[in-house]
Image (cartoon, rainbow, N blue to C red):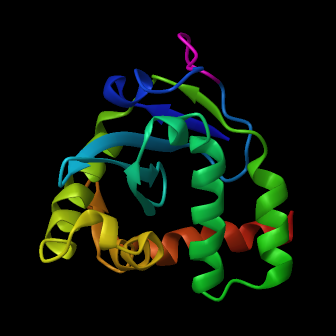
């Protein structure tokens, strides 16, 4: 799996490829960007095709070395909360593979990240970011409709459809 990082996030990570990497995972690519809420570092992830978002709040320097593992754990936890079967969760865990980082970004996905950031700031406006449950916030972010090039859809439904195709492979 490849995480395309913005420059801001790439500066915090230990190993980021200078050249664009080629994706070979059937689940596709993700983008990630570093935000600050309540003076705390937070990362917002967005799946390129489904625009499925994940939110990791309150990261410290040591967490950035484990960002791939943290993303994987949060992704699998959100899928479990979405009532994805145990068999399919195991299949997804196998398909994800090792995480690699590069700085190749897509403006459309970055625009979706910006919209998710605005929705996120509304979701957590009445609480401190360290009091947020990343699983609950991630689930709420994916229940909102989004659009890509004039096509409207729900990220949750798009991701679950994408994952169900793994059973047929």
Q: Residue at x 55, y 68 (%)?
A: 159
- 29 relative position to 154: left or right: right
Q: Quadrant of residue 94?
A: bottom right
**Residue 47 position within the rendered picture, expressed as x and y whole percent measured from the top left:** 49, 53
Q: Residue at x 58, y 16 (%)?
A: 17
Figure check: 87 above or below 72: below
Main SS, magenta region, reads loop
Q: Residue at x 33, y 73 (%)?
A: 132
Q: Quadrant of the N terminus?
A: top right
Is 74 in the magenta?
no
Q: Which residues are magenta?
A: 16-21
Asked if one can make out residue 152 in the rendered structure from this viewpoint, the answer is no
**Residue 5 position within the rendered picture, expressed as x and y whole percent measured from the top left:** 44, 31
Figure check: 46 above or below 169: above
Asked if one can make out residue 166 in the rendered structure from this viewpoint, the answer is yes
Q: Quadrant of residue 121?
A: bottom left
Q: Residue at x 36, y 80 (%)?
A: 143
Q: Nearer the viewer, residue 125 or 30?
A: 125
Figure check: 45 above or below 123: above
Figure check: 162 above or below 63: below
- 91 relative position to 33: left or right: right
Q: Residue furthest bottom?
A: 83
Q: Quadrant of the C terminus?
A: bottom right
**Residue 93 position within the rendered picture, expressed as x and y whole percent measured from the top left:** 78, 60
**Residue 69 position within the rendered picture, expressed as x and y whole percent measured from the top left:** 66, 49
- 61 relative position to 16: left or right: left
- 19 relative position to 56: left or right: right
Figure disc tally: 0
């Amino acid at each position: 799996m490849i995480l395309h990082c913005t420059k801001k996030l790439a500066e915090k990570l230990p190993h980021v490829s200078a050249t664009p990497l080629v994706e070979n995972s059937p689940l596709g690519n993700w983008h990630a960007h570093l935000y600050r809420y309540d003076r705390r570092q937070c990362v917002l992830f967005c799946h390129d095709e489904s625009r499925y978002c994940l939110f990791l709040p309150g990261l410290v320097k040591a967490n950035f070395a484990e960002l791939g593992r943290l993303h994987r754990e949060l992704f699998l936890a959100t899928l479990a909360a979405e009532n994805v079967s145990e068999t399919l969760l195991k299949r997804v865990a196998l398909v994800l593979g090792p995480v690699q980082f590069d700085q190749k970004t897509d403006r459309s996905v970055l625009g979706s990240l910006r919209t998710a950031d605005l929705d996120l700031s509304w979701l957590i406006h009445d609480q401190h970011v360290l009091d947020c449950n990343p699983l609950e916030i991630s689930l709420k972010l994916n229940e909102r409709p989004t659009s890509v090039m004039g096509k409207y859809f729900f990220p949750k439904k798009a991701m679950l459809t994408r994952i169900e195709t793994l059973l047929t492979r």
